[in-house]
Image (spheres, rainbow, N blue to C red):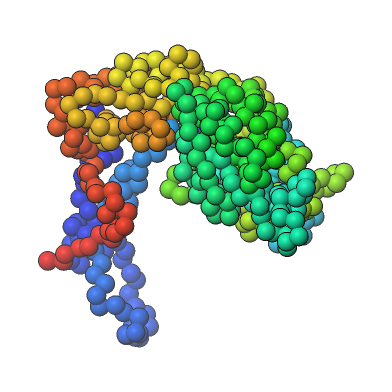
Amino acid sequence: MNNSFFQNTPLLFEESVNGRCGVILPKLDVEEAPLPKEFLRTELILPELDEASIVRHFTRLSHKNFSVDGQFYPLGSCTMKYNPKMNEEAASQRGFSLAHPLNPDEHNQGSLELLFKLQESLNEITGFDGCSLQCAAGAHGELAGLLMIRSWHEHAAPNGGAVAGTAQGTLRRTRILVPDSAHGTNPATCSMAGFVAQAIPSDAHGAIDMTALKEAVKDDGTLAGMMITLPGTTGLFEKNIVEIIKIIHDAGGLVYGDGANMNALMGIVKPGALGFDVMHLNLHKTFSTPHGGGGPGAGAVVAGKTLADFLPGPVAVQNENTYRLEQPALSIGRLKVFNGNFAVLVRAYAYIRTLGATGLKRASEYAVLNANYLRFLVKDHFPTPYGSDRPCMHEFSASPDLGNGIHTIDIAKRLIDYGFHPPTVYFPLIVKEAFMAEPTETESKETLEAFAATLADIAQEAKTQSELLKEAPHVTPVGRLDDTAAARNPVLRYTWQNS
Ligand SMILES: *Cc1c(COP(=O)(O)O)cnc(C)c1O
């Protein structure tokens, strides 16, 4: 067990020694002047330390962070894949990092060409016709997609979605169907875009319940569309997807694809060809740009012919050998300043070009292979309630039962002691005590086996020393927090009692 990252170490303030200083200032060669009183805070007590101690303090703090570069990070649904360092080099090239978005287009041709080629690459990978790189996250892309669907119903749907004789914008089609296995952002997005989310239950196999779906689309003229995650959050491919999309289209709705799980499909399935109308991609998941800690990310939005003109803009367009920015004809407008999180887009483009078509396909194949191997290794203690009789995609949602009153939260906390990031827990909601693991393609066989062996050890501990799990983690500066209180009343500042 290597706990060095987490070991408690002295804190900066406790190391303070009166009069110690990190610099030696030269002798004054001017008259000494008092510091302006209004700027001096008497209550501000600062520690007195040498330079090396300060460097060590901050370096130690940085080591307390958990990271993809440091440890195995099987956080389901989040695709915490390795971030190739070459992408950083690409993004920090001066031509990109110093380019100003207010420069005239002719001075930014390289940046615009990159945006254009990234749009084209994402269209090719997903089988769509249009792409916008404005949005800063997956959830932001969802909002864009639903606003596009809304706009289509208001202005362009056959027979109009708006009630005849009323002002445009009075929407008759207000219902969006959302499977009960969906990510929480999906129903939240429905509300933000002015729709009402209606949950569709899953069947005994974790798939969308077809009977419930057919019931929900019975035409009363209020169906606006459906949001579907493919593969679903149970880690399974939705076998009826083509039929489901047809049912929604026949009922006058459009289909939004939550593409956060595209890591299972690159080079294998094109969601555009399945009939989806619009979808977001999490470039910070599938396309290897760093994420965690809240950003910056990128939620590219891709759309088929029906909705491409509604994309948020501007988007990059090519005109012979020059590139410029243009607002799509019926655009819902701008959703972010300038051209999205540009440096993130450079990283995603570098990743796509480095791997190429063959490499992207292989990444998806290995992601799926790794998830299936890990699922097999842990199946005795971590069985998957849905789809255990068929291959999973790039992740799986297990339902552990280690006995002795041990819950998934205890297993997750104990994994921290062993130096592993816990998988996603208690999501999806339809999986009891959900433990959702996504190893990603870049993990070695040895890492997967070490993780599985640790889970087997934890299952053994649950039998013989269950208190070890109940009180875990044991190696972190703080252990079990009251989650609700910590979220509502976070104490983020260290207070030093100067003696
Ligand atoms: C991550 C994720 C999202 C949201 O993406 P963000 O970039 O975090 O906003 C939506 N749906 C699914 C299935 C996801 O895994």
- Compared to residue 91, the image places residue 212 above or below, namely above
Q: Name the foreground residue: 283 vs 258.
A: 258
Quadrant where the N terminus is found in the figure = top left
- Compared to residue 377, the image places residue 252 above or below, namely below
Which residue sits at x=31%, y=79%? 40
Q: Name the foreground residue: 237 vs 136.
A: 237
Which residue sits at x=14%, y=32%? 467
Give the image location of residue 383, x and y in percent: 35, 20
Give the image location of residue 304, x and y in percent: 73, 38
Give the image location of residue 423, x and y in percent: 37, 32
- Compared to residue 35, the image places residue 22 above or below, namely above
Residue 118 visible from this viewpoint: no
Quadrant where the C terminus is found in the figure = bottom left
The answer to whether 291 appears left or right of 449 in the picture is: right
Give the image location of residue 198, x and y in percent: 52, 43
Q: Residue furthest right?
A: 320
Residue 164 visible from this viewpoint: yes
Which residue sits at x=44%, y=23%? 204
Q: Name the foreground residue: 185 vs 493.
A: 185
Q: Which image quarter: residue 284?
A: top right
The answer to whether 464 appears left or right of 433 in the picture is: left
